[in-house]
Amino acid sequence: MPSYHLTLPYRSAWYTVLLPTLICLGVWAGLALGVPALRGWNIPGWLGALLCLGGFVPGLAAAWATYGLLLRLAERGRGEVVLEGDRLRWRTGRRWHEVDFTRPYWAGIAAGFSGLGERNACISLNPGGQEIHLKGARREEVLRLFPEPGFVDELAALPEEGGWGFVLSADDPTAVRFFNALVECLWRNRQNNERFRLYQKFPWHRRPQPAFRHIRCIRPEERTPEDEALLADLQAQFLDGLADSPVRVTPDYLVGWAYRSPRGLIGGWPDSYVMPLGFITADVSLPQPTLEEPAEKRLLYVQGVGEDGNPLKLAFDWYGAMDKEHEEAEFVVRFVRAMWGKAR
């Protein structure tokens, strides 16, 4: 196997992530704490809530206004990467970091378009918390080397969109050969990839075979012995490890629970929703602010057809980016989307 030693442009997370975050939080804290302090901490409750929740708007505006300058500062960085067989080393200062792909590691791959509409591919690595970008890369080329579309994210954000890492160009043949060799290395050692093992929990290449096409609601006060048997059978087939989730997935169904009927809420028994894969879609909302968890709460929206034949949209509490189950929850959503239109 050929080895590579490249000197590349590097954009530090200090400029693209940390400083913008500190600027945003600094402005927010200045408003949320500074204004009450100037008024002797004697302000009405509504004003305190407004400053606490609304202070993020000027904070985001300040971070956006200074982001261009921070990007120009970030462009001055450079670093080295070395790929030798199944081992990758890199440095951006004096210290070298390393990933041995023959041992357990974590890696994510994205290939498609960035938020700015540019073609890009990105490999994210742990240990080391590093990203390697190939600007101008085509998704089909990455999938030729790593033929698992469900694993390869379609949104490949660039460093200037809040990421970081080494930046290669698809116009450089040496850079392309290096990036392709790294993708081949990830494919060759995919069984050591902790993220890929999460992906393998789901039968991506099997067509779902649900017994019905509509979303079925089973209310606790109306359950029959047949309903109980169905729910017990589905529970034995759960693919994911999201034990405390309001939504679980089987090879043929998405199963969710929510308190929507008065009797169920009073009795502490949620309604059960059995949603056939292949006939439903799933989307995750942006973080939604709440008084308990500002800007953290997210919802899983599931759309399909109800038992009456009319369109039906359901919402369930879902995982945020800071939850430890976030990665597996992401694959659940991808799996549901991938099954759309494939049911027998």
Image (tube, rainbow, N blue to C red):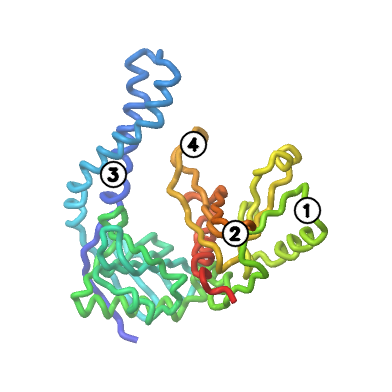
Marked residue nearer the N-terminal end (4 or 1): 1
Report helix, strand or loop for mark 2: loop
The residue tagged 2 is: 309
**Which tag is nearer the camera, tag 1 or tag 2?**
2
Q: Is residue 269 above or below residue 266?
A: below
Residue 252 percent coordinates (x, y): 63, 69
Disc 1 residue type (three-letter): Arg
- Find residue 287 and report its image quarter: top left
Separation (CA) of disc 4 from disc 2? 34 Å
At label 4, counting other C-alpha atoms closer than 10 Å, the crowd grade (few under 14, some 14-19, many 20 or more) is few
Report the front residue among 306 and 186: 306
Residue 7 vs residue 31: left or right? left
Marked residue nearer the N-terminal end (1 or 2): 1
Q: Is residue 249 visible?
A: no
At label 1, counting other C-alpha atoms closer than 10 Å, the crowd grade (few under 14, some 14-19, many 20 or more) is few
Residue under the point 63% across and 65% down: 253
Disc 2 residue type (three-letter): Gly
Residue 24 percent coordinates (x, y): 31, 38
Separation (CA) of disc 3 from disc 1? 55 Å
Separation (CA) of disc 1 from disc 2? 21 Å
Per the rendering, the mark at residue 19 is 3
Residue 318 vs residue 75: left or right? right
Per the rendering, the mark at residue 290 is 4
Per the rendering, the mark at residue 223 is 1
Marked residue nearer the N-terminal end (4 or 3): 3
Q: Quadrant of the N terminus?
A: bottom left
Report helix, strand or loop for mark 1: loop
Residue 68 percent coordinates (x, y): 19, 48
